Amino acid sequence: MTESTFMRLSALSIAIGLVIATTVSGSAQGPRGKDLEKPLVIAKQGSFFVGGEKKALPALPPGGRGGAPAGGEITINQMYVQYQVPPNGDRHVPVVMVHGCCLSSKTWETTPDGRMGWDEYFVRRDRPVYLADQVSRARSGFDASAINAVKTGAAPASQLPTVLQASNQIAWTVFRFGPEYGKPFPDGQFPVEAADELYKQMIPDFNSILPTPNPSWTNMAALAVQLNGAILMGHSESGFFPQQAALIDPKGVRGLISIEMPCADVNAEQIGKLAKIPNLIMFGDHLGDVKGGPANWADSFATCERYVEKIKAAGGDAEMMYLPKLGIRGNSHMLMQDRNNLQLADMVIAWIDKHVEAKGKH
Amino acid sequence: MTESTFMRLSALSIAIGLVIATTVSGSAQGPRGKDLEKPLVIAKQGSFFVGGEKKALPALPPGGRGGAPAGGEITINQMYVQYQVPPNGDRHVPVVMVHGCCLSSKTWETTPDGRMGWDEYFVRRDRPVYLADQVSRARSGFDASAINAVKTGAAPASQLPTVLQASNQIAWTVFRFGPEYGKPFPDGQFPVEAADELYKQMIPDFNSILPTPNPSWTNMAALAVQLNGAILMGHSESGFFPQQAALIDPKGVRGLISIEMPCADVNAEQIGKLAKIPNLIMFGDHLGDVKGGPANWADSFATCERYVEKIKAAGGDAEMMYLPKLGIRGNSHMLMQDRNNLQLADMVIAWIDKHVEAKGKH
């Protein structure tokens, strides 16, 4: 399906879409305005790691304060998780949120312009929330051995990791703040006046050094088991991580929420497994309105439309929330930070209530 | 002063020390046991960045998804800060906590064996708490340009950053869990059964790439101003950061809390500035009981004793809490994670009440 087809579909369905959006948000809108400033009550909060394994340390720069003796070990592939459980949290399925490329869990926290993020909002809507820094990023750390090996001459420069460090300019267009750097879409929902604060969230991405399967997938699956059932949510680079985690071990996975990513071309056996779990996919606006650059969101959307069709054909539950089709315009790739982020959160929560929790076991 | 002098002093002062410790903890002990499981009420929480500047990006690996056009910029030297303010928070001076080498703000959160960390405990004792990931670490990100420059052949391997990646073995001895790897001190307070969870907190340290002055210092000073007054707390690598921040701009700095670090050899003019702010320094036990290795804690202690004397000689307020001298034995370098961490937190809070808050302006 092409972008122009989307446009025609959108035009045709705006009336229907508005009705759906109104119904969704009308039936399950959470707190707004002053109500968001009420004290937040937490039953339990904290942080911990999932996974991790020991690795012998080959070498370190001589004279470095961290210089380890021969045979020293480091711990790698662990995943840092920070959580808050509200007082009524045990009535709901926990939600695990995982960020995208070149970002950290900051994605889900206070927005660049200082509004409430999805993390606290979901907690205020009685959901236990678990934020995971991807393995090899932020507080999860990464294996820097190759850097030290090259610096000390023990390995050639070609063995350095490929580090993704996206520029502010790339972020503007890949995240679809506008058609070109510095020029916003007239109806854009991203708070572009605070774009400099978004750029500060962008940190080096070492996913290229990870083994297969990506330990984030394994750790997400393990976390879902540890929580005795969880909904896994991913965004962009991690958008299909929930499915990858479920393919490794579906036992704890109660729901799959994927935001703005390419869907992998999974085979029939895999579709059979994923069709047993409710799937929600969400895409924003202007998918084909940025020309050039490393991301093609219209193509990504098309891969996910095919994925949704396959899940449905296998008797599964998959919903594509293509926001413009629902009458919601102007959303960027960072839709959890967009001006209407709480409206979108309400839609996700309404989906959870209907597709995951209404099915019981909680 | 030598370690053996400490020992004699300790022996002489245990009786006095016990009285002091009892008085301190008796007069201001916070919640324990089941009371720590009561719901936590938060007036406001979130995260933001302090500082940061734009830098032109020289090159990126060809074909990388983050490949930026010529002239692209990244944002560097920003400091990620996560905070919680309790309902009575405006009655107290905020506390900014900064972690040490090869660690992140995880230092202050849930302990390796799953107990409450200083972050939540201080909030439960009505203090606004701000956790900062040091510039170039964890969610603050770092400048990976040099890695990419070397990988693409644009720079020689010698220009790679020196990355500190401490081994588990080094951590055991430098953090004084015991005299040698795997062998704990009989009276040790660190929960060594959970040492593997501590190792997962250890992540690559890129401080070697930072300019002078370290942007963490500048950002800590700016944060104190932004908060309209704050107590700055550092540990180990960052133990003297509070002082360095105050030397850059003392305006917002209401107190300096330094845990287990070498004290810099500051000059008379600097002492004059630092003597205007209350100083607390805390050291644990077994300072001279680990032989060899990259850290010499007895030497570090001696530098801080000299610092305390200089502040006092300049008419300032400086207190050295050398825990064994107070009758509190067995504390490790990671004393905020030790079994008696809440007792130590109470002592810090009692010091804040007496030395910072009793002086008014709040």
Image (cartoon, coloured by chain):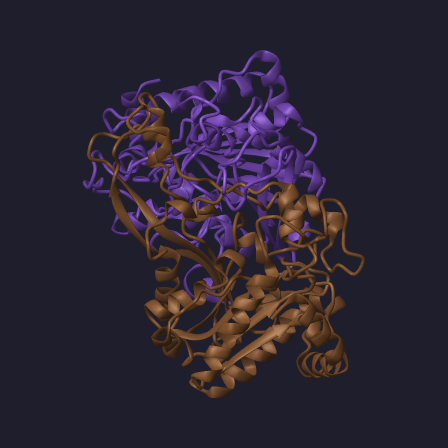
Chain colours: A brown, B purple
Q: Is B116 above or below relative to B313? A: below
Q: Please give the name of the residue rendered at 63% of the width and 58% of the height, measured from the top-left corner.
A: A333
**Residue nearest the observer in this picture, A162 or B174:** A162
Q: Is B237 above or below relative to B199? A: above
The N terminus of chain A lies in quadrant: bottom right
Residue A317: x and y in percent read 49, 82
**Residue nearest the observer in this picture, A19 or B202:** A19
Q: Is residue B290 visible?
A: yes
**Residue nearest the observer in this picture, A198 or A361:** A198
In the figure, residue A339 lies in which quadrant?
Answer: bottom right
**Residue nearest the observer in this picture, B281 or A29:** A29
In the figure, residue B132 lies in which quadrant?
Answer: top right
User: Furthest residue to the right?
Assistant: A186
Q: Is residue B39 visible?
A: no
Count of marks, rendered view: 0
Residue B167: x and y in percent read 29, 37
Q: Is A96 above or below relative to B289? A: below
Residue A263: x and y in percent read 49, 65
The C terminus of chain A lies in quadrant: bottom left
- Left or right of A185? Residue A146 is left
